[in-house]
Image (tube, rainbow, N blue to C red):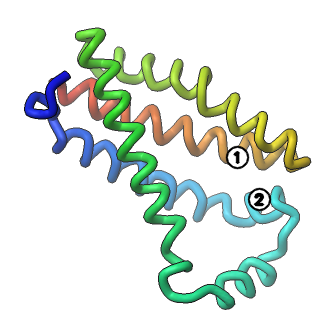
Amino acid sequence: MHFASVNFLSILVATVAAWLSGAVYYTALSRPWMAAQGKTPEQCKAEQASKSGAAKYAPFVVVFISEFIMAWVLYGILFHLNMFSARAGAIAAAFCWLGFVVTTIASNNAFGNRRTSLTVIDSIAWLIALLLIGVVLGAWGA
């Protein structure tokens, strides 16, 4: 895959779609997500208030960059398989999620003694993100 042939606009659009879906998802599940971490809304507010300006936004930047890399890699997979369709993108995304993302989250959370509900909430968020990325990339094509 040559960089000149990569459709970076599709990757950027897929990244933005995934990033915005995470904002909606975690806004809707903010209380269960905090509870799964064993925190109260007051504790989370206090933690946010203690951070500097840049530190408050750093996690959002990290997620955006991570989703961009995921989109770029998934684009590469679809490119090498020569299977650009919304269906192929969704299937490839689901396999990547099952094989790499949910297994990593589950393993890290198991060793961190985190609640199963946190694993479920976070894993579903990444599934939605990857499915959106896969569908956008697959439907857009090379």
Of labels 2 and 1, earlier in sequence is: 2
Q: Where is the N terminus found, in terms of image quarters?
A: top left
What residue is disc 1 on? 121
The part of the image, by quadrant, that contains residue 72 is top left
- Classed neighbour count for the residue bearing mark 1: other residues with Cα under 10 Å, few (<14), some (14–19), many (≥20): some
Label 2, secondary structure: give it: helix
What residue is disc 2 on? 32
- Horizontally, residue 12 falls left or right of residue 100, namely left
At a point 44% along the width and 64% down the height, the residue shown is 61
Q: CA distance from mark 2 to mark 1?
A: 8 Å
* Residue type, label 1: Ile
* Residue type, label 2: Pro
At a point 16% along the width and 44% down the height, the residue shown is 9
The part of the image, by quadrant, that contains residue 26 is bottom right
At a point 36% along the width and 46% down the height, the residue shown is 68
- Horizontally, residue 133 falls left or right of residue 142, namely right
Work out whether 17 lies above or below 46: above
**Residue 137 image offset from top left, x and y in percent:** 27, 31
Nearest to the observer: residue 93 or residue 31? 93
**Residue 10 image offset from top left, x and y in percent:** 21, 39
**Residue 46 image offset from top left, x and y in percent:** 74, 87
